[in-house]
Image (spheres, helix red, strand yellow):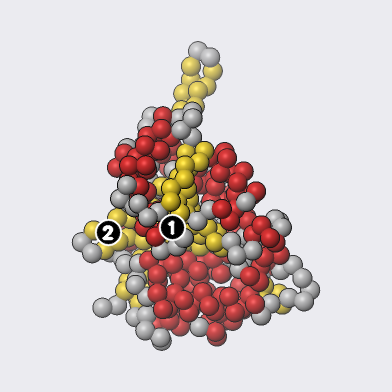
Amino acid sequence: MSSKILVLPGDGIGVEVADQTIRVIEKLNEQGLDANYEKDLVGGASYDVNGEPLTEAVLEKAKNSDAILLGAVGGSKWDDVERSKRPEAGLLGLRKELELFANLRPALVFDALVDASTLKNDVVNNLDIMIVRELTGGVYFGQPRGIEDTSNGKKAIDTQVYHDYEIDRIARVAFDLASKRNNKVTSVEKANVMETGVLWREVVKETHKDFSDITLENMLADNCAMQLVRNPKQFDVIVTDNLFGDLLSDCAAMLTGSLGMLPSASLGAEKNGKRYGLFEPVHGSAPDIAGQDKANPIATILSLSMMLKYNLNKPELSNKVENAVQQILSEGFRTGDIYTDENQTLVSCSKMGDLIIERI
C-alpha cells in the first residue's frame, strides 16, 4: 500500500526547501518508496488565504496521512497578528491535535563541516547527540496564562504543568533510543527550584527500572547548557521538558555550525499500528533570503530521512539519503550558510537538490 505524505511548505524558505525535498521523494519512488504526496497551506501562508494558520481541512488531511513534512513557519510579516492566529499557532496546533509529544533533534557534526563550528575541532568532531524534548506539555500549554492588570501594574502569568504519565512516556522514548545508540540517557530539569523538576526526576528514575541496561544521569538544565559547550561528547541521549528542550536543542544545534543542516522529528504514540509523525528542519523561515534560491535544503531532506526511518519503515532508503548528503559535503559543495572556504563550491538551493538526487 502506498504511503501518504502531507507536505506543508509553510512560509519563507520553507517553500524552496520543501520543493527540493519533494524532488527527493520522487527520486526515491523510483527505488521502492511508493509514496504519494499532497501539498497544502499552514502558518502565515494559510492565514493570508484562510484567516487561520491551521484549518480544520488541513488538520483532517494530517490525521489521514502516514507522515507530515513541514518546511518552516513564521516571519515578521505576521508580528502584529493576534497570538492565536500567528503562523506558529498552526505548528503548535498540529503538535497538540496529533499528540506529537516526542521531539527528536539530532546534533550531528558531519566530517566535512567540522570547521564550520565555532568550537575547537577536538571538542565537536564525531559529535552525535540526540535531544528528546517533551512537546505537548509544560509551560507552553499550561493554564492559567495571560497578562492582566493589577494594582501594582500589569502581571504576566505562564504556568508550568506536568503529569507523571507525560514524563513517563517521553522517558521511555529516550531510553528506547539510547538502547539503539550508546546506552546512556541524561535527564535534564531544575529539581533544585521547580516542583515539576522534582516530579520529573522521580518519574524518570522509576521508568529507568524497566531499562536497567541503560545508564541514567540526572543533570540540572543550567549545568547541561554549560556542559554542551564545554564537553558535548559526554552526552548520548538528552531527555528534557518542553521549555528546556527548546533552549538546549538550539544550543546543541549551533555546535554543528549551522541550523540549516539539522532535521527534527515529532512523534506521537503508536495507536492501532499507526504512529503520527511530523518532520521538519530546525531552522526558521528566513524571510530575508526567501525566493532567492539561497536556502540550504539539507535539513529538510534529512528530515525526510528521519521520516523514512521512524515512520515509513524504509531504513535502507534513509541510509541512501544520508550517504548522498555526506558525499556532497565531502566533495566540497556548499550553500551560502556553510560556505567558508574559496576552495569549496558555492551552490544554490536548487543545485544542492540536483546534486543530492544525482547521488541517491
Using the image as rendered, state which of residue 63 and residue 315 is in the foreground.
315
User: At which x and y percent is residue 250?
Assistant: 57, 51
Q: Which mark is residue 304?
A: none
Asked where in the image residue 3 lies, by quadrant, the reply is bottom left
Using the image as rendered, state which of residue 89 and residue 333 is in the foreground.
333
Note whether 352 is above or below 180 in the view shown.
below
Q: Which mark is residue 270?
A: 2
Crowding near the residue tagged with mark 2, few <14, some 14–19, many ≥20 C-alpha atoms within 10 Å: few
Q: In the picture provided, is 165 more to the left or to the right than 152?
A: left
Q: Which mark is residue 183?
A: 1
Quadrant showing the N terminus: bottom left
Given the current orientation, which residue lies at the most extreme left position?
272
Asked where in the image residue 312 lies, by quadrant, the reply is bottom left
Note whether 151 is above or below 28 in the view shown.
above
Residue pictured at 34% horizontal, 40% vertical:
203
Q: In the picture provided, is 136 more to the left or to the right than 108?
A: left
